[in-house]
Amino acid sequence: MKILKGIKGNKLRSKSAVIVGVFDGVHTGHLALINLAKRKAAKIGGKSVLVTFSGHPDRYFSKNTELKLIKKHSHNLEIIKRHGIDVCVILDISKVSTMKAEDFVKKILVEKLNMKSIIAGSDFVFGRGGLGGVKLLKSMSKELGFNVTVVADKKVQGYKVSSTIIRKKLAQGDIKLVNKMLGRPYTIEGEVIEGRHIGRDIGFPTANIRIKYEEIPASGVWAVAVEYNGKVYTGAANIGFAPTLKGEKDALIEIFIFNFDSVIYGKKLKVRFLERLRGEKKFKDKDALIAGINRDISYIKKKYGIKIRKGATK
């Protein structure tokens, strides 16, 4: 996949089939657009082109600083590359946000990207004030020589697949619905940091990962699969602030990996979330905490076993 950062000085010679969006999480709805763009590009003997942005429009336009992304930008690009898009164009949202919708179509999509086909969802909006949409694209298509394909909404369990719904369901801990919408298991990767060894002192040594805000599912206790050094282990994870004994200022994921005793500070783990058992709670004392942890571990071992087959987090 060729990546173009910005459009200045870049102009495609090949005809293109284009899709435009943020593509946060790259869910099954996005994949439907990607696959159709590839087929359209093949028919016209051109390139499939994905246009995305360096920032999220909601953060820029509404100043919604509380918006939590499903995945960081670099992770989304990795998934897009994996699915075979020819060219990815990354535009600075602050620079294109003031463009009229008509200018965005004519000056960027047609003149710079040589667009002959555009694929969009029915609720696709673009341009200054969000005034551009499918209706405008169709009205401009004959004059500028491109066709418009509108893709029907994809639904899972009655919900329209969208990044907004996925964020909401992640925050609620509904990992099964999230995975269905993504079309793959939701995972995070992080580097193990050294903690205060409180878990070790009470008999449950944990691998601690400081997680970025884009990648935090619901707080609480989870059953997880942990991939390290080519093997996949079962574990119990707590996401949050460890209020009983630690009272962390920043959210952590603390993972007690079953049948595992290696020192792995500085190593990376991939964590797949299997089930949210409960919310994070503050126990009355250390003994109550230990009893609660033992109950959680017993449940996870009974339901998921000790070790998950290799490759389960791929």
Image (tube, rainbow, N blue to C red):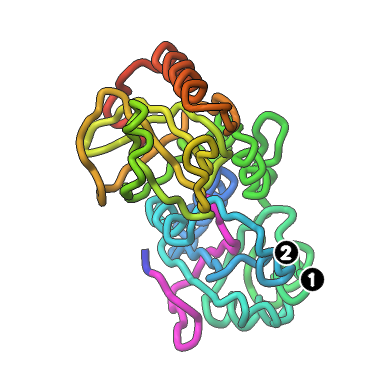
User: Which of the two residues, 91 or 110, is positioned nearer the viewer here?
Assistant: 91
Residue 31 seen in this snapshot: no
Q: Residue at x 57, y 33 (%)?
A: 280
Q: In the image, what residue type sits under mark 2?
A: Val
Q: List x then y, in percent, for residue 273.
A: 46, 33
User: Which of the two residues, 176 or 44, is positioned nearer the viewer here?
Assistant: 176
- The region drawn magenta spans 3-25
Q: How many marks?
A: 2
Circles 1, 2 touching at the beta carbon (< 8 Å): yes
Residue 299 located within the stretch drawn in magenta: no
The crowd level at tag 2 (other Cα within 10 Å; few <14, some 14-19, many 20+) is some
User: Which of the two residues, 227 or 191, is positioned nearer the viewer here?
Assistant: 191
Q: List x then y, in percent, for residue 128.
A: 74, 76
Q: Quadrant of residue 56?
A: bottom right
Magenta segment's dominant SS is loop
Check residue 131 in the rendering and tell me which mark sits there, or answer none. Answer: 1
Q: Quadrant of residue 301?
A: top left
The C terminus, quarter of image: top left
**Taking 285 as reference, is 165 above or below it?**
below
Q: Residue at x 57, y 38 (%)?
A: 219
Give the distance between the C-alpha atoms of the residues marked 1 and 2, in whole angstroms. Answer: 7 Å
Residue 9 located within the stretch drawn in magenta: yes
User: Which of the two residues, 205 or 123, is positioned nearer the viewer here?
Assistant: 205
Q: Residue at x 36, y 15 (%)?
A: 305
- What secondary structure is found at the residue carrying circle 2? strand
Residue at mark 2: 125
Q: Quadrant of residue 175?
A: top right
The N terminus, quarter of image: bottom left
Q: List x then y, in percent, for residue 271.
A: 39, 38
Q: Residue at x 73, y 73 (%)?
A: 140
The crowd level at tag 1 (other Cα within 10 Å; few <14, some 14-19, many 20+) is few
